[in-house]
Image: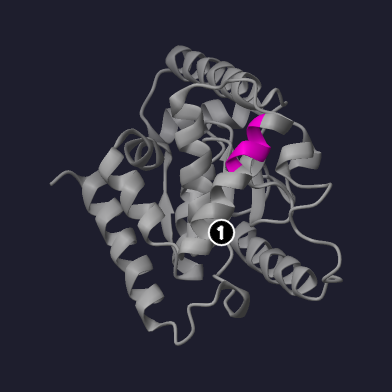
């Protein structure tokens, strides 16, 4: 079993155990722990931040390779859908269609699998998703969304230090990564990955320690969850300001 398979199976087991412990499977009586998405610039230490945040929250971090592995496996896709109540499965399909009707420009099978998987994860909760445009799929009312940025010179220094790259290679990696991620978000969602309005919190790691960023993020996550729980029930989470119409 690969490390990615181990991560996936461990998370599925956790979700299945949490579902089995629920005394009432009526979806209106259960709110899963919030899902958290982290977008980051290469060299910003955003991946390390996501790992520390997941540890503090008692979540598991699911990085891009894990998300793609789930999307590309019919077995994993079936398993995640079967983790949901029947009523939620229908709701997820409606959400997927809303995303593609409202904003998605790429209608490939992968894009639909990605939307279905991430929307399902949001209903199961309790994970930190790194990359793959989770915030654009979920919208402002589902989950908590962050972007970690850093000045280019510090990103290059970090890549040289932590990945043991030459300056030239570090500069190239940062530039190539920025381009790939920008194009991915533009292609799938017709959106700008750097648009601050698409995130709940943008953290500049230039002069903030990772542990301080984690403390700030946890406070903000709890604050948003509390505010959402007190919103007027007449303003449904899937209404005019969700992912599909953003």
Task: Report the residue marked by disc 1.
Answer: 35
Q: Residue at 37% of width from left, 31% of height from top? A: 163
Position of residue 161 measured from the top left corner of the image (x, y, whole percent): 42, 34
Total label count? 1
Q: Residue at 31% of width from left, 53% of height from top? A: 79
**Viewer-proximal residue among 171 and 15:** 15
Q: Residues within 10 Å of mark 1 (few under 14, many from 20)?
A: many
Q: Which colour scheme appears in the figure?
A: one colour
* Residue 140 falls within the magenta-colored stretch: no
Q: Is residue 7 left or right of residue 122?
A: left
Q: Residue at 60% of width from left, 80% of height from top? A: 29
Q: Residue at 75% of width from left, 40% of height from top? A: 198
Answer yes or no: is residue 61 visible: yes
Residue situated furthest bottom in the rendering: 23
Q: Is residue 78 left or right of residue 216?
A: left
Residue situated furthest left in the rendering: 1
Up the image or down, 113 lies above or below 220; here it is above
Position of residue 100 measured from the top left corner of the image (x, y, whole percent): 64, 31
Q: Quadrant of the C terminus?
A: top right
Name the image quarter holding residue 44: top right
Q: Is residue 219 left or right of residue 70?
A: right
Up the image or down, 169 lies above or below 181; here it is above
* Residue 99 falls within the magenta-colored stretch: yes
Position of residue 60 measured from the top left corner of the image (x, y, whole percent): 40, 60
Answer yes or no: is residue 246 visible: no
What main secondary structure does the magenta stretch of the protein show? helix
For mark 1, give the secondary structure. Answer: loop
**Viewer-proximal residue among 171 and 241:** 241
Q: Is residue 241 left or right of residue 74?
A: right
**Viewer-proximal residue among 37 and 206:** 37
| Span highlighted in magenta in the image | 96-100
Position of residue 199 measured from the top left corner of the image (x, y, whole percent): 73, 45
């Amino acid at each position: 079993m690969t490390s990615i398979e181990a991560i996936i199976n461990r998370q599925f087991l956790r979700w299945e155990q949490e579902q089995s412990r629920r005394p009432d499977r009526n979806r209106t009586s259960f709110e899963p722990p919030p899902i958290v998405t982290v977008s980051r610039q290469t060299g910003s230490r955003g991946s390390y931040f996501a790992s520390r945040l997941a540890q503090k929250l008692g979540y598991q971090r699911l990085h891009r390779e894990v998300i793609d592995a789930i999307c590309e496996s019919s077995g994993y896709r079936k398993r995640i859908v079967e983790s949901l109540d029947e009523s939620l499965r229908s709701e997820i399909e409606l959400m997927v269609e809303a995303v593609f009707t409202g904003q998605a420009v790429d209608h490939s099978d992968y894009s639909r699998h990605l939307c279905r998987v991430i929307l399902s994860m949001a209903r199961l909760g309790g994970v930190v998703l790194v990359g793959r445009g989770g915030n654009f799929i979920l919208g402002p009312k589902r989950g908590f969304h962050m972007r970690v940025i850093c000045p280019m010179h510090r990103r290059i220094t970090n890549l040289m230090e932590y990945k043991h790259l030459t300056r030239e290679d570090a500069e190239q990696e940062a530039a190539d990564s920025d381009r790939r991620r920008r194009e991915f978000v533009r292609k799938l969602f017709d959106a700008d990955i750097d648009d601050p309005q698409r995130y709940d919190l943008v953290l500049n790691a230039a002069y903030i320690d990772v542990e301080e960023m984690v403390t700030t993020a946890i406070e903000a996550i709890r604050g948003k969850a509390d505010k959402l729980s007190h919103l007027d029930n007449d303003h449904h989470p899937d209404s005019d300001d969700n992912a599909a119409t953003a």
